Amino acid sequence: MTAQLIDGNALAKQVRAEVAQRAAALTARGHRPGLAVILVGDDPASQVYVKHKVNDCETSGVRSVLEKYDAALPEAELLARIAALNADPTIHGILVQMPLPKHIDPQKVIEAISPLKDVDGFHVQSAGALMVGRPGFLPCTPYGCMKLIATTGIALRGSNAVVIGRSNTVGKPMAQLLLQANATVTICHSGTPDIGLFTRQADVVVAAVGKRNVLTADMVKPGAVVIDVGMNRKDDGKLAGDVDFDGVSKVAGWITPVPGGVGPMTRAMLLVNTLEAAERFAQG
């Protein structure tokens, strides 16, 4: 393998340590950061994600409140619970784990969360702030990806960057963050006839479509930074990303593994957002 591994676990550990230090200082002033996590239903993957998030809080000095509900929970009751958490001064961040049961509208749930507590960065107000370059909560996965890219030392100003995927949670905000860093950004998606035409010119590629091997070695510029956001299950049950890791790692300059790359940093930036929400609340 020629590519250098971008260790998300190691970087996330550093971020958590920084959060713990700032959280301790804030707690000493009487404002312990608080995160409410809501889990509706019994989706196995969601249960694992929530467990990791709660554990991260415990090791970082952030108070976590986990609320579990049956999959049959009426939408109105969930919205009412969110409204109560919006009004709770001890809760600075609210996270509703996705996916939700089919009878609950996820967009309605996202918009019910106060923009002041939108630590996932999914609210339309957060998205609008990102679009126009105003302060606001950044979506945790793109935020974490930018931190991972920064560890490579590559200069984004003047670079060519390609984002594969156009979701509201990763693809679009990822492109915005790269654009703000003065990269020239191209978004590829299912309607792009030849993705390789663009990725072969890219200094940075972020793959975020949830499809295995969407990026292969012949599609990568030698020495490029490759960030793999994908999370897929192989036939043997093991995790795999969107990138053909074995092949691409022989061409790229830097690459994130799956697992151990973007995932830990997504959770770490959730802590950062929660801490910053608490700090803003403490400032009045």
Image (cartoon, rainbow, N blue to C red):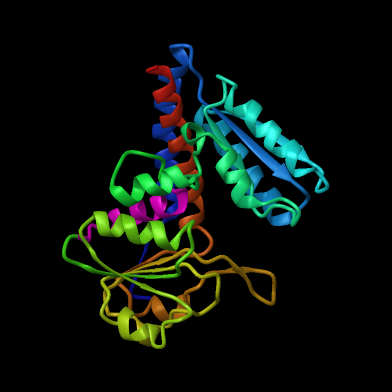
Q: Residue at x 36, y 44 (%)?
A: 129
Residue 107's spot in the image, x, y percent?
59, 51
Q: Residue at x 39, y 50 (%)?
A: 143
Q: Residue at x 39, y 83 (%)?
A: 195
Q: Is residue 226 left or right of residue 167?
A: left
Q: Is residue 237 above or below residue 78?
A: below
Q: Residue at x 71, y 49 (%)?
A: 47
Q: Is residue 247 above or below residue 59?
A: below
Residue 196's spot in the image, x, y percent?
36, 85
Residue toward you, 276 or 133: 133
Residue 250's spot in the image, x, y percent?
36, 79
Q: Is residue 10 left or right of residue 155?
A: right
* Residue 160 falls in image quadrant: bottom left
Residue toward you, 188 or 74: 74
Task: Residue at the far top: name it.
Answer: 29
Please say whether residue 151 is one of the residues in the magenta stretch: yes
The image quadrant where one finds the C terminus is top left
Q: Is residue 163 above or below residue 192?
A: above
Residue 237's spot in the image, x, y percent?
69, 70
Q: Which residues are magenta?
A: 139-156
Q: Is residue 29 left or right of residue 201?
A: right
Q: Does residue 66 appear in this view?
A: no
Q: Does residue 283 appear in this view?
A: yes
The image quadrant where one finds the N terminus is bottom left
Circle count:
0
Please say whether residue 23 is one of the residues in the magenta stretch: no
Task: Residue at the far left: name it.
Answer: 158
Magenta: main secondary structure: helix
